[in-house]
């Protein structure tokens, strides 16, 4: 117990300049901010999906670093007027660009709670560390990975791919202790389909793999990696003295949402003595959708899985995850002894395994709290329903496109939630359809109707909808199709 005479009993910060002078007034301000933010979230669908950033914001940001304090209420009003309405649009039901998640209402509570705790989750003994462990265990079990599996929450799948490939590289380098590490590294090869995400190229470069290490294997008509081509590439490389280190399957490719034949890839990896990594940025959580789960059965055989909570679990940015089957090797890849991080038997510095032993970061936010809030509030079943509904919406969009054979072309039969299509009026002859479709996408964005991104598929620029959006309705999809046709007709003259 602290006595009244101890130094700690004195208020060490009477009037600390960075805390509110009046906490009651601050509480009132926060109430008003919550009121404004919840009203914004509730009315989001009625506002434009996207609108250009106003010149007034750019002017105000062009000034020098702010020197003197301002009233907090005034600052919030400026945020509300100049920043809040000009988001990328992913909280709106008709945002379908790239692969963005929507964000959950439960996330507002979670992020306020996160900010209040301001936990540093690099390690130490506190509640946040145990919440993160629980989240990792829940998803390890969901993917059917064994108890030896370790994991780490990261800012997204780009980072989770990097961490997974770092462990894979470590395993490959440890397999032959007689060879110089640099020499062996130069011979390691990583196999993935030509549809692999760009974060893999980045990771391979950062991890010092040779520029020729990434072997891009051809895909079939459904954009899935061709297993026979993979086997021939491996055989040729082995013959040339190269070492197949990693076989990478994608569960939900970024361009068309295809799922590679994961179980077959697991078999090929086992035969070649290679690590089997799955980039499941959005698709891995398809295990929650009864219609997709059978295609993802091979996930449980992966040596590592990278996936995002901020995509198909709709949790606020930015939180992804790497799960690694061989937890001991995962720890050995990243843990580094430092006396200032020593582990005690008791107290705040206790605990054998800290998150900083499993990834490149030391200071880390309490990312697990937004997942905990989401799951405690909704239960996993609601996420299954939301994902399955996105799959149904993608199938509906594909059907609606096929109802306009004279004007719309479907680029891919959607396997998950990504649909590529374009406007191309057969009767209009040789129009520049790439330009027309680009103009359709830009027009939909600038008029605040919908956000689609673009992709080049089968030699044509296609409109691309990735429906990782729990707010989208079937009417939103119908409106998207009607607007595409209307704009296409106008642009095609
Ligand atoms: C297949 C795939 N892998 C990796 C990533 C990168 O994920 P993140 O943006 O969370 O880093 C994406 C992003 O869309 C993706 O679709």
Image: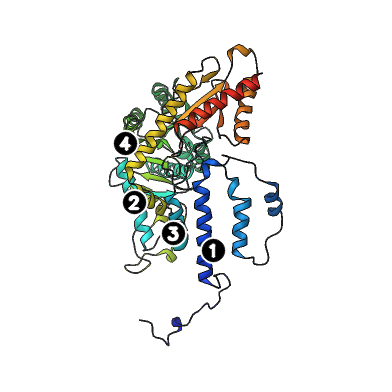
Instruction: Identify whether 213 is placed above or below 9.
Output: above
State the image coordinates of residue 284 (x, y, percent, origin top left): 38, 37
Find disc 2 in the rendering and name its residue.
Answer: 376
User: Cβ–Cβ below 8 Å for labels 2 and 1?
Assistant: no
Q: Which mark is residue 192?
A: none
Find disc 1 in the rendering and name its residue.
Answer: 29
Looking at the image, which residue sits at the far left?
147
| Secondary structure state at the residue bearing disc 4 | helix
For label 4, the crowd category at 10 Å Cα-Cα, with few meaning under 14, some 14 to 19 and many 20 or more, is many
State the image coordinates of residue 402 (x, y, percent, origin top left): 48, 19
Real-space CA distance between mark 4 and mark 2, rounded to the nearest whole angstrom: 28 Å
Find disc 3 in the rendering and name its residue.
Answer: 113
| Secondary structure state at the residue bearing disc 1 | helix
Real-space CA distance between mark 4 and mark 3, rounded to the nearest whole angstrom: 36 Å
For the C terminus, the image quarter is top right
Q: In the rendered structure, which disc, 4 or 2, sits on the residue that comes first in sequence?
A: 4
Q: In the rendered structure, which disc, 3 or 1, sits on the residue that comes first in sequence?
A: 1
The figure's colour scheme reads: rainbow
Real-space CA distance between mark 1 and mark 4, rounded to the nearest whole angstrom: 51 Å
Q: Is mark 1 within 8 Å of ligand 1?
A: no
Q: Nearer the viewer, mark 3 or mark 1?
A: 1
Q: In the rendered structure, which disc, 2 or 1, sits on the residue that comes first in sequence?
A: 1
Q: In the rendered structure, which disc, 4 or 3, sits on the residue that comes first in sequence?
A: 3
For label 2, the crowd category at 10 Å Cα-Cα, with few meaning under 14, some 14 to 19 and many 20 or more, is few
Q: Nearer the viewer, mark 4 or mark 2?
A: 2
Q: Nearer the viewer, mark 2 or mark 1?
A: 1
For label 1, the crowd category at 10 Å Cα-Cα, with few meaning under 14, some 14 to 19 and many 20 or more, is some
Find disc 4 in the rendering and name its residue.
Answer: 301
């Amino acid at each position: 117990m602290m006595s009244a005479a101890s130094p700690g009993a004195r208020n060490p910060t009477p009037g600390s300049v960075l805390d509110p002078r009046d906490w009651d007034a601050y509480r009132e301000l926060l109430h008003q901010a919550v009121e404004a933010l919840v009203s914004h979230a509730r009315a989001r669908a009625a506002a434009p999906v996207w609108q250009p950033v106003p010149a007034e914001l750019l002017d105000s940001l062009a000034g020098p670093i702010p020197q003197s304090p301002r009233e907090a209420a005034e600052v919030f009003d400026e945020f509300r007027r100049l920043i809040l309405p000009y988001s990328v649009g992913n909280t709106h039901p008709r945002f379908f660009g790239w692969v963005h998640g929507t964000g959950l209402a439960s996330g507002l509570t979670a992020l306020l709670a996160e900010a209040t705790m301001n936990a540093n989750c690099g390690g130490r003994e506190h509640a946040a560390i145990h919440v993160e462990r629980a989240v990792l265990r829940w998803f390890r079990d969901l993917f059917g990975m064994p108890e030896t599996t370790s994991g780490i929450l990261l800012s997204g799948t780009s980072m989770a791919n990097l961490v997974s490939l770092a462990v894979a590289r470590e395993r490959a380098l440890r397999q032959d202790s007689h060879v110089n590490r640099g020499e062996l590294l130069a011979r390691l090869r990583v196999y993935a389909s030509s549809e692999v995400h760009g974060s893999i190229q980045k990771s391979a470069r950062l991890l010092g793999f040779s520029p020729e290490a990434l072997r891009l294997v051809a895909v079939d008509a459904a954009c899935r990696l061709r297993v026979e081509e993979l086997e021939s590439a491996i055989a040729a490389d082995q013959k040339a003295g190269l070492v197949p280190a990693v076989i990478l399957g994608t569960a939900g490719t970024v361009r068309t949402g295809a799922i590679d034949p994961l179980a077959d890839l697991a078999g090929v990896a086992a035969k070649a003595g290679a690590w089997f990594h799955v980039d499941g940025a959005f698709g891995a959580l398809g295990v929650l959708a009864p219609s997709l789960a059978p295609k993802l059965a091979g996930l449980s055989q992966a040596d590592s899985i990278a996936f995002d909570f901020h995509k198909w679990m709709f949790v606020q940015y930015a939180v992804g995850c790497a799960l690694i089957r061989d937890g001991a090797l995962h720890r050995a890849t990243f843990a580094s002894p430092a006396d200032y991080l020593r582990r005690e038997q008791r107290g705040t510095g206790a605990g054998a395994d800290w998150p900083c032993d499993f990834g490149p970061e030391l200071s880390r936010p309490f990312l697990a709290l937004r997942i905990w809030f989401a799951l405690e509030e909704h239960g996993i079943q609601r996420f299954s329903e939301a994902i399955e509904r996105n799959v149904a919406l993608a199938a509906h969009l594909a059907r609606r496109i096929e109802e306009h054979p004279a004007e719309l072309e479907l680029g891919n039969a959607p396997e998950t939630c990504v649909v590529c299509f374009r406007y191309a009026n057969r009767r209009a002859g040789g129009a520049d359809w790439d330009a027309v479709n680009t103009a359709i996408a830009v027009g939909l964005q600038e008029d605040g109707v919908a956000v689609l991104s673009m992709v080049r598929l089968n030699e044509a620029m296609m409109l691309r909808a990735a429906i990782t959006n729990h707010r989208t309705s079937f009417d939103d999809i119908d409106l998207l199709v009607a607007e595409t046709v209307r704009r296409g007709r106008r642009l095609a003259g």
